[in-house]
Image (spheres, coloured by chain):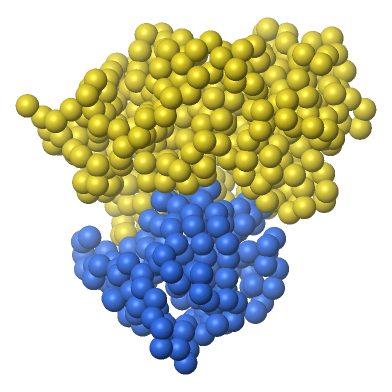
Amino acid sequence: MKFKGNVWKFGDHVDTDLIIPARFLNVSDKDELAGSCFVDVRPDFAEHVSPGDIILAETNFGCGSSREHAPLAIKAAGISLVIARSFARIFYRNAFNIGLPILESEDAPDFFSDGDMISVDLATGQIKGEGMDRQFSAKPIPPFMQEIVRAGGLVEYIREKGAL
Amino acid sequence: MTAPMTITEKILAAHAGQDSVAPGDLIRVDVDLALANDITAPLAIRVFEQLGPREVFDKERIALVPDHFVPNKDIQSAQQAKVMAEFARRHGIKHYFELGESGIEHVILPEKGLVVPGDLIVGADSHTCTYGAVGAFSTGAGSTDLGAIMATGKTWLKVPAAIKVVYEGQLLPWVGGKDLILFTIGQLGVDGANYKSIEFSGEVIRDISMDNRFTMANMAVEAGAKNGIFEPDEITRKYLEKRADREGNYWQSDPDAHYEKTIRIRVDDLEPQVAFPHSPANVRPLSDVGHIGLDQAFIGSCTNGRIEDLRAAAMILRGQTVAKEMRLIVIPGSPDVYKQALKEGIIEDMLDAGAVIGPPCCGPCLGGHMGILAEGEKAIATTNRNFIGRMGHPKSEVYLANPAIAAASALLGRIGSPEEL
């Protein structure tokens, strides 16, 4: 799977309260959740994010609560992929379960800034900036997890395949 | 002969039907208890229903607890709570607790004896790691994982590498489990135990009460840990003997079990700890806090909403008055904690001091209701997270501390020690 989009840059330890504050968890509709995504730290996010955009962050992205509303809101806002140096454990699992692909990259987060256009190959983990020769690498995603992403999440995958 | 294992590895191996497991192994395990609350259950129920018409795997091994936004704070929360209540009724879920019987999930499940040593518990709430206090493997997951567990009773896990934290020495007055765990998170950092197991041990731990153990295990996730665990002992047995029908399995780590890292902490000089905004790892000893004026103090939550926490606070508040222009909110973690506090005169002492008492629920901890902060306000709280906007306005500030420090600070109107009173 290949992705191309503009970068939204975030720092270290982006917690789930920043992704979607708890006061908005009184609903579970993903499109409603998307409207409050990053509202406290990047109030312009929900309005200006374009379908296919990519989040690029530093370490421990998604730390804090187990709320699956966090990856759901990011995905429903239009983000196609999250790249970070590392992810918090529960977020990592939740993201794939709801069909939001995520990649761990050591070097890419240093290099790109807000608005840069990048293209990413999920199978190889290659990350490239638009009009740039230099390539960055991420840990590739194994085929069955790419399949979960392609299906749209774990539930859809199980319904398609009849099993995990 | 199997290789030496930690208590966590032994519990995981037993639930995978294997003789042994090692860090990094991917295993399929049977789940003893699955848990969700009014925020996470509606999503999990949607997943469960999308998997096709079926019964839950076991009506007696699912706990559904309304605690986050109850008593329902608005129409939308009421709708969410109703989804969970109706599901529980439709499927005959034994451990669904309606208001009056319900309290904070991580306070009531151990009180009701639903978690015992050796259990494997998965909950759609990150603080599910609390039950490591009784010697169970207990971890937080998302709603999709929980929906699948409600359907199958199974899940897959990666066996975590272990970090052992050994506490040695003699605790100073006003220092307890909250200070030990805050100091430990400060040492590890908020991702220092990401994907890992934390095992709490040492002479200090051998003597420490269950309520203190719950506080410590509860916050293991604030260092990123998959679980935090104590080896069950006589203190555990005594706590559970009148509560639980099941005996459980009192696994102990083998003396030569492998730990990726062992941290030794001398506690003799350890002061009460305060975590500054906006990270639970941003800790300072109380004497380094300086002048931090406050608008609110909150005593409660799954971290510090138990009877010993209220006792510690009441000892400070008794006969005193909360500082002018300062709000003190106390929320007992469960109806049992509330009743016990009434019996001991704690509630009256608190009311006399000027506290307001809320009904058992999560309250303002996660910015839900019953004590939200306005722009620029500062609060001291006995809770577990002080992220940006956690208790209200994104420009408010939360300082984490133990119940005695929170109570003393409520009287002083600034962060301070009981010794100053």
**Which residue is drawn at the image coordinates 78% and 29% (left, top)?**
B415
Q: Which chain is represented by blue in the image?
A: A
Judging depth in this view, the residue of B262 and B382 nearest the camera is B262
**Which residue is drawn at the image coordinates 44% and 57% (left, top)?**
A87
- Colour assignment, chain B: yellow
Q: Residue B407 location in percent, x, y?
A: 75, 22
Residue B140 visible, this angle: no
Q: Residue B349 location in percent, x, y?
A: 78, 12
Could you tell whether A109 is left or right of B71 in the image?
A: left
Residue extending furthest toward the bottom: A131
Q: Quadrant of residue A37?
A: bottom right
Q: Residue B340 location in percent, x, y?
A: 62, 12
Could you tell whether B299 is left or right of B337 in the image?
A: right
Q: Is residue A117 above or below residue B239?
A: below
Q: Is residue B5 above or below residue B125?
A: above
**Which residue is drawn at the image coordinates 66% and 33% (left, top)?**
B284
**Which residue is drawn at the image coordinates 82% and 51% (left, top)?**
B375
Quarter holding the C terminus of chain B is: top right
Could you tell whether A2 is left or right of B180 in the image?
A: left
| Count of marks placed on residues | 0
Residue extending furthest toward the left: B1
Judging depth in this view, the residue of A110 and A69 nearest the camera is A110
Q: Quadrant of residue B385?
A: top right
Residue extending furthest toward the right: B324
Quarter holding the N terminus of chain B is: top left
